[in-house]
Image (cartoon, helix red, strand yellow):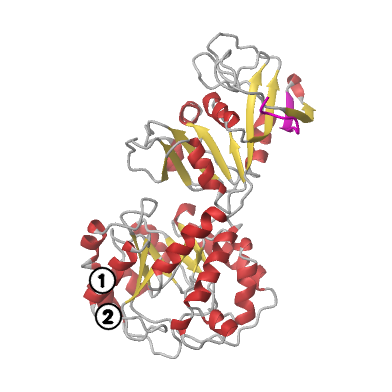
Amino acid sequence: MGIVNINDDSFSGDGTLDPTEAIDLARSHIREGADIIDIGAESAQTNREAISIEEEVRRLKSFLDLWPKLRDETKGADDEQVSPALLSINTWRPEVVEQILGPDIDLLNDMSALFDDRNAHLCATHGIPLLIMHSVGQPKVSHTHQKWDDLMGSMVAFFEEKIAAAIHAGLTRDQIVLDPGLDFAKQKEDNLLVLRELEKVIALGYPVLLPISRKTVIGDVLNLPDPRDRDPGTLALLTHGITKGAHIFRVHNVRESWETLRVVTPLITNTLHVVVNLAITADGKISTTEKSPSHFTSKKDLQRLMEIRTQADAILVGRGTHEADQMTMTANGHRPWRCVISRSGDFDPEHPLFHTEGGPRHLIVGPEAEVNELPATIHRGNLADFINEIQCHPSVNTLLCEGGGSLLRELFELDMVDEINLTWAPHTLFGGRDAPTLTGLPGDFLPASRHYQLSKMEKYEDDEVFLTYHRSSLDSSS
């Protein structure tokens, strides 16, 4: 997220009241790697009086008038960048928000700590995501004497309360971003604690924005009073934030931050644990010859599935299974990534997945696939490419695959499966030469053995048996 200050009192001295200069800076940010441009017309400094509502609106609109053309014609630094770039508005007074929100805006970056629900209602009305920042009191008021007995406990409780208020106002869970509010009502040790224990905010299951650029905490640590000297410290916090699992980084120096991100990301040694969960019949089939939903297991099996899902950071299914079972991949309040793979990219826009709340949606498609405009992140490439990508993502440690057979076969061929959970229904027999098995069609064997050992077995009514296997130490390549 590249910062554009449309003011003359920015704490880092990079503001401008000239809309043409602001647009030029935004263009430069996008070319240097920014996925999001964040514009603000009023400094957060507490030693300055607030500008009038009319003046803030005038400054913001002077940029907004020029934004659509810039957004549509400016290319980013690489193919991984969000394109066209998104626009975030950094403002908090509802009287301003009411006049500014519109179709060209993608996020309201609200630093008010959501002291009431007016901005949440406005975002819900316009269908625009809302950022909730942690702080106390209203902006433009100094809180340098704020003391915390349990900062992280208070922060989690704060977010839970404000998220509930935002949802009650009409926002969905997919429309909420969290910001721990570095330097807002926090002193040096408070900020350092937030950074050390950031996973407590990440664990809430929402995208987290980390506003790290040239912050006072960097100046406190390095004894650098001039914010413009703090870019190396900013990169240190960026690296830390990536390893902790933050999702958005708000920065002044986009080029250096983009380069740091590109170098650090592939170095993150995240060990991905891949889990398979399926139900099979007495003859080892996972579906009928028509590959239709089987529905042969019990309520206990569904309960077990939900338990397994709540341990996953991402759930992956093939498009055929996804559509046959009308899967939404929800998990009892848990918000794992919901991932569907299809080489053709032929997804049904009316599928319940795209109309239910839950974790972020990710679609894996072939390099040349044409995909409808859908509320999801698109990944182009094959399964191995996607696995490599999420292995570098610090918030995804466990991937759960729920079928179908062709997808499982690919995972086995990649030798990626660490754990297999099977519900065996020995009272059911599908039969049929074309009914799929765990690894695809019968007789189409894996090119090499894969060894697993039974680690747990539980029997329930109707002779249903739950089996758990873990990768064994035997050589799987012979």
User: Residue 24: which disc?
Assistant: 1
- Magenta span of residues: 465-478
Give how far across and how far down residue 466 sits, in percent. 73, 28
- Specify the quadrant of the image occupied by residue 125: bottom left
| Classed neighbour count for the residue bearing mark 2: other residues with Cα under 10 Å, few (<14), some (14–19), many (≥20) | few
Which comes before the other along the chain, label 2 or label 1?
A: 1
User: Residue 320: which disc?
Assistant: none
Judged from this view, the residue extending furthest toward the top is 432
Q: Is residue 166 magenta?
A: no
Q: Nearer the viewer, mark 2 or mark 1?
A: 1
Q: Is the residue 369 above or below the residue 147 in the image? A: above
- Specify the quadrant of the image occupied by residue 351: top left
In the rendered view of the protein, which quadrant contains the C terminus?
top right
**Residue at image location 28% in from the left, 66% down from the top:** 27
Alpha carbon separation for disc pair 2 and 1? 24 Å
Classify mark 2: helix, strand or loop.
helix
Going by the numbered disc 1, the residue's amino acid type is Asp
Q: Is residue 257 visible?
A: yes
What residue does disc 2 label?
A: 54
Q: Is the residue 350 above or below the residue 215 in the image? A: above
| Classed neighbour count for the residue bearing mark 1: other residues with Cα under 10 Å, few (<14), some (14–19), many (≥20) | few
Q: Is the residue 305 above or below the residue 296 in the image? A: below
Q: Is residue 466 magenta?
A: yes
Give how far across and how far down residue 242 sits, in percent. 54, 61
Going by the numbered disc 2, the residue's amino acid type is Glu
